[in-house]
Image: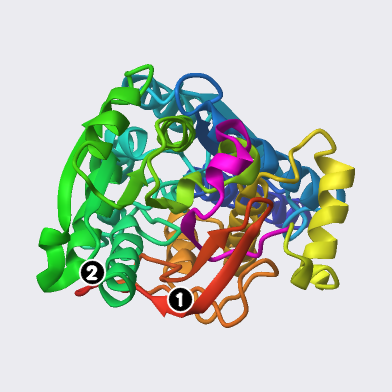
Amino acid sequence: MHMRRNILKYVGAGLVVSSSLAFASISQAADMPGVTDTEIKIGNIAPYSGPASAYSTIAKTISAYFDKVNEEGGINGRKVNFLSYDDGYSPPKAVEQARKLVESDEALLIFQSLGTPSNSAIEKYMNMKKVPQLLVATGATKFGDPENFPWTMGWQPNYQSEGIIYGRWIAAEMPDAKIAVMYQNDDFGKDLLNGLKTGLGDKADMVIAEASYEVAEPVVDSQVVKLKASGADVFISFSTPKFAAQGIKKAHEIGWDATQIVANVSNSVGAVLTPAGLEASEGLISTAYLKDMQDPQWADDQGVKDWNAFMDKYYADGDKLSSFTTYGYSVAQTMVHILEQAGDDLTRENVLKQAASMKDVTLPLFLPGMSMNTSDTDYFPIEQMQLMKFNGERWENFGEIISGEVGGN
């Protein structure tokens, strides 16, 4: 009888251990939504349709990159389940998709949601839910505000910094220029315009004409005609790809012989310059932070060779002329780095912590000398760029790597 009591005692102890392990497992699952022993569920929102659909190449490239990662064993043994939904570049649709990803799919985070309007629409929701909104696909300066929106972080150089770089260059190299600016009437266009004027400093009155457009407009021909009539000899287009291509084409058609600058987000040879016409695009100026795959100086670069092999195997129908593929490839590598750093502690809090503690992280397709740095007060991973000029076939970088840090961040 005495022996039987001991057996029961040990069986009871075993039950206690088992149930406590079960509770620990349930508790861990509750703290790590979107994560199992074999999977990490990552959400994405992209414009597969609508006026900014050219950008869908980015999400397609990211998806292909995660295919590569999964085939090679995943991240710390877990495969990435990449859920990418279309919002048509519509803020209300973006909200709908964000809620679906967070509440129905229970994704660990939303990564590379595209566009200033869409990210603006979901930012408060994501922060209220304490779900990381990481490496957003917009350079709007407001997405580097850890004090007010600690769960939202950018990736690419912010638009204000880019505008500052153009302003400083024009003020130094073309001090007598008359500048006309076409810009998208939202945070994207306004950030670039404000940066331009900041960079021009006491020469801000060089901007003699401005014309905005709404994303719902079909064409921007009238804006280009109006700006040419101002007599400006520098035409700056702070526009998304569809409208940037229209602007380049129209300026050429009406014989506007101005120095043209296009925003970094719209300098893809495949998605913008080819539709606009390569002859019409000759002489364009923009900025770069990634290697141009068409530039012969990178022919023997290992990072470029690896990218080519990736495209051939995982995204064979992708456009190698499009800078959106190098962008998607590089931002996906950044996300993988963050998740690898997080190890097995894949709570939303720890993933955010890793994103906000990058130090001198470089990527294979970065221009030499560039790296990513973040902290809990600096949510701008990339703050360096180089100017470049289109020679009719490809971009050629010129000048030094320029830092365009925005004060106070």
Q: Residues within 10 Å of mark 1 (few under 14, many from 20)?
A: some
Disc 1 to disc 2, how far (Cα)? 23 Å
Q: Please state the horizontal and vertical placement of residue 284, each as a whole percent of the image.
A: 49, 53
Residue pointed to by mark 2: 199
Task: Give above or below for 408 relative to 86.
Answer: below
- Picture coordinates of residue 372, whole percent (x, y): 50, 73
Asked whether 23 or 258 is in front, the reply is 258
Dot 1 amino acid type: Asn
Which range is magenta?
Answer: 274-293
Q: For mark 2, does the 10 Å Cα neighbourhood hold few (<14), some (14 to 19), or many (20 or more) residues?
A: many
Instruction: Specify whether residue 282 is painted magenta.
Output: yes
Residue 34 in sight in this render: no
Residue shown at the point (53%, 36%) measured from the top left: 44
Residue nearest the viewer, comparing 56 with 262: 262
Q: Are marks 1 and 2 in contact (CB under 8 Å)?
A: no
Disc 1: which residue: 373
Residue at image location 24% in from the left, 53% down from the top: 179
